[in-house]
Image (cartoon, grey):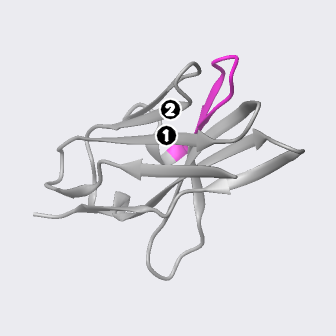
Amino acid sequence: QVQVVESGGGLVQPGGSLRLSCAASGSFFSINAMSWYRQAPGKQRELVAGIVNSGSTNYADSVKGRFTISRDNAKNTVNLQMNSLKPEDTAVYYCYARAFSSGWSDYWGQGTQVTVSS
């Protein structure tokens, strides 16, 4: 069993910053990819940023230059530093991890709300 837990969401004014954190724990041998997704009301869940254990990253075009994903492989944690936040960044942010236990499986956190509003 693998647990994925996010923290760090909240309310911030436009132009502000927030840092999201995510930790994976439980019974697994390794984690390959860790990513952040988000889902705004009435919209599909979308990839925000991802990072694999080699350190290679990818970002949605809408957040490039504003968001930075980082990872601590030893602690099985991933962070998302969000700067220059815009109202359109408002969404529930979900952490994702692909972990190997009895086989490769996908695990999701419960989500954390990020609201950008004045």
In this orientation, which residue lies closer to the viewer: 92 or 31? 31
Residue 4 horizontal/vertical position (percent): 55, 50
Mark 1 and 2 residues: CB-CB less than 8 Å, in contact?
A: yes
Residue 112 is marked as none
* Left or right: residue 42 compared with residue 1: left
Sequence-wise first label, 1 or 2: 1
Give the residue at x 27% y 48%: 85
* Left or right: residue 17 compared with residue 45: left
Placement of 25 over or under 107, stated as above or below = above
The amino acid sitting under disc 2 is Thr
Residue under numbered circle 2: 77
> Which quadrant holds residue 59?
top right
Placement of 101 over or under 113, stated as above or below = above
Residue 46 horizontal/vertical position (percent): 59, 59
Residue under numbered circle 1: 23
Q: Residue furthest right?
A: 103
Q: Which residues are magenta?
A: 50-61
Residue 45 horizontal/vertical position (percent): 59, 66
Q: Quadrant of the C terminus?
A: bottom left
Residue 29 horizontal/vertical position (percent): 77, 31
The amino acid sitting under disc 1 is Ala
